[in-house]
Image (tube, grey):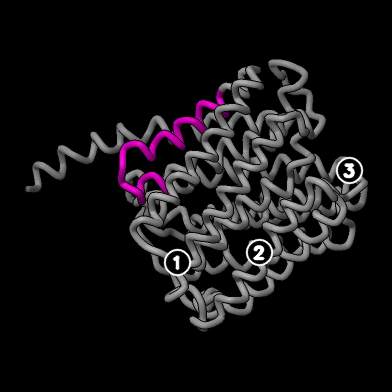
Amino acid sequence: MEKLETRGRPRVAAHRLPLLAGALLALLAGLWGALGLLGLDVPLPRASFAQHHGALMTLGFLGTLISLERAVALGRPWGYAAPVLAGLGAVTTAAGLTLAGKLLLTVAGGWLIAIYVAVFGRRRGSDLVVQTSGAVAWYGGALLWLSGRSASQIVPWLAAFLILTIAGERLELARVAFLHRRATGGLLATAALVGAGAAASTARPDAGWRLTGLGMAALAGWLAVHDVARRTVRGTGLPRYTAACLLTGYAWLAAAGTIWLAAGRPDTSGMTDAALHAVFLGFVISMVFGHAPVILPAVLRVRLPYHPVLYAPLVLLHVALAVRVAGDLGASGAARTAGGVLGEASLVLFGACAAAATRLPRKEPS
């Protein structure tokens, strides 16, 4: 039996590692394009390369990771088409074949919906409804992008995809994640506001962005009150680290939501940039950092034990984001650039620390 398990693990890793490679290529392309948007003199393959930064990070990198996780949970070979399509779409977009890339990323979103539909055949739950709504937001936003809308015009859809996916996953863990089991109705209501705002943003941008912002701020407040992270942050080891990631992420989600609620679709580049990075970096990447020690072993069968070194990229991420947001709101190009570069460094540092954590002796700080 032991020989069979040992023999099976490399085969499973070989099956999934190319999919992870697609996500990493999308991440690298997105980060390189971001350096161009920061005004740094970096060589770009074409003038339009940096314009796809947001789509590559959201649908290419995170979309591939999320669909891969869902495909593994489904456990059926056809489910892996979603991360394959997302990874190919990201690589194709980065290569300059924009129309083909958009099409592949759109189909990937539709395939993710199919995965959730298949899961509905096994069980029912409001968490699945919320997560499926996130996949619908991916598909709807990508359709608009494919039809000619710019990436900046579909931002509420992209935000809804990630926010609803994360909210649904927290709801899926309701028995251990929330302090009060009967309080999940509030999460459903706030998630509905986020989804409704994204839908409304297509015809009524200002009202849609405000409604999305209201949902984001309300969801952040609800999670901050009801999530068990309020207690586990006083603990030790992995529970405390995860709680720190969650609570700081909720703070950035509230900040972004407040900006959108107050300003509608922001009409100044500084305010737009501040809100975008508050939600997509401050909230979403904090969630990635916090859940990576659990998700990566489940997806790749690679051990990723907790080690205090994981706090280094988390601290750098939030310090960098604070500097960047201050630069955005204060019209300081130097602070904006410094914060942006440090933010990218935090992602690279997380990868290095995660690799180091697999080799360092395990520590549980008090």
What residue would you read off at disc 2? 192
Report x, y in % for residue 228: 52, 77
Which mark is first along the chain, 1 or 3? 1
The Cα–Cα distance between marks 2 and 3, rounded to whole angstroms, is 28 Å
Secondary structure beneath dot 2 equals helix
Number of the label disc, if any, that sits on residue 125: 1
Secondary structure beneath dot 3 equals helix
Q: Nearer the viewer, residue 293 or 206?
A: 206
Residue 112 drawn above or below residue 316: above
How packed mark 3 is, by other alpha carbons closer than 10 Å (few <14, some 14-19, many 20 or more), is few
The magenta segment is 70-91
- Residue 97 falls left or right of residue 178: right
Report x, y in % for residue 218: 71, 70
How packed mark 1 is, by other alpha carbons closer than 10 Å (few <14, some 14-19, many 20 or more), is few
Give me the residue at 79% from left, 50% from top: 201
Nearer mark to the viewer, of 2 and 3: 2
Nearer mark to the viewer, of 3 and 1: 1
- Residue 77 falls left or right of residue 104: left
What residue would you read off at disc 3? 269
